[in-house]
Image: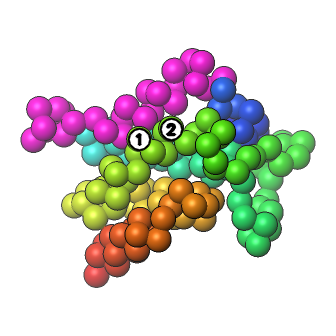
Amino acid sequence: ALLRFHGARAVEALESQLILQFFATLITVPGRGEGGTDAAPQLRNVGVCALADLLDYSVAAPPALGSRALPAGAAGPAPTAPLNNDHPALKYVKHALPALQQYAAGPDVKLAQSSLHCLSVLAERGGKLFTRAAAAQAAQSAQGCLS
């Protein structure tokens, strides 16, 4: 909710409380076969959904997309910023990108769906960070999930 109402301004506050670091850690929590827990897919999914919200509400959308409906009670759109070297979310994106690409083609359907959604938001708003090769790999993962 903080991101939805405050956008990029909320990132610093969430970082200071270690909330974003916690969600970033969840994305790469080890699974049972890696000496971790059986709950790894669910924990990873929570982290992936949090990252998707971070991107969706704090990173500026390309102008061609227009604006979206405001959440109930919002005074105006949340401030966003382009995902460049100055954006505080960039370090979380770089940390999670390899895992997102792996999960998008993985066996857990819910985690794959969340990862594909996060990758699609990143492709839409990530600018040059999301290279053509990464976009092609994400598209291939999506095609694998759909077939």
Q: Which residue is found at the position 47% from the left and 27% from the top?
A: 21
Q: Position of residue 22 (x, y in %)?
A: 44, 27
As for residue 77 lying within the magenta part, the answer is: no
Residue at 9%, 41% (x, y): give it. Answer: 33
Q: Residue 27, located in which quarter of the rendered image?
A: top left
Q: Which residue is mark 2?
A: 91
Colour mapping:
rainbow
Dot 2, how many residues are within 10 Å of its Cα: few (below 14), some (14-19), or many (20+)?
few
Q: Is residue 135 left or right of residue 83?
A: left
Query: SS class of the residue under badge 2?
Result: helix
Where 48 falls versus 68 (above or below)? above
Of the pair 63 and 43, the residue shown nearer to us = 63
Q: What residue would you read off at disc 1?
A: 95
Q: Are marks 2 and 1 in contact (CB under 8 Å)?
A: yes
Q: What residue type is disc 1 on?
A: His
| Residue 89 placement (x, y as % from top left) | 58, 39
The quarter of the picture where residue 105 lies is: bottom left
Image coordinates for residue 125, horizontal then vertical, percent: 63, 59
State the residue in front, 34 or 123.
123
Q: Is residue 29 left or right of residue 89?
A: left
Residue at 18% from the left image edge and 33% from the top image edge: 37
Tell me the magenta residue range.
13-38
- Which SS type dominates the magenta stretch? helix
Q: Nearer the viewer, residue 125 or 145?
A: 125
Residue in view at x 19 percent, y 39 percent: 31
Which SS class for mark 1?
helix
Name the residue furthest right: 75
User: Looking at the picture, which amino acid does disc 2 mark?
Assistant: Lys
Q: Quadrant of the C terminus?
A: bottom left
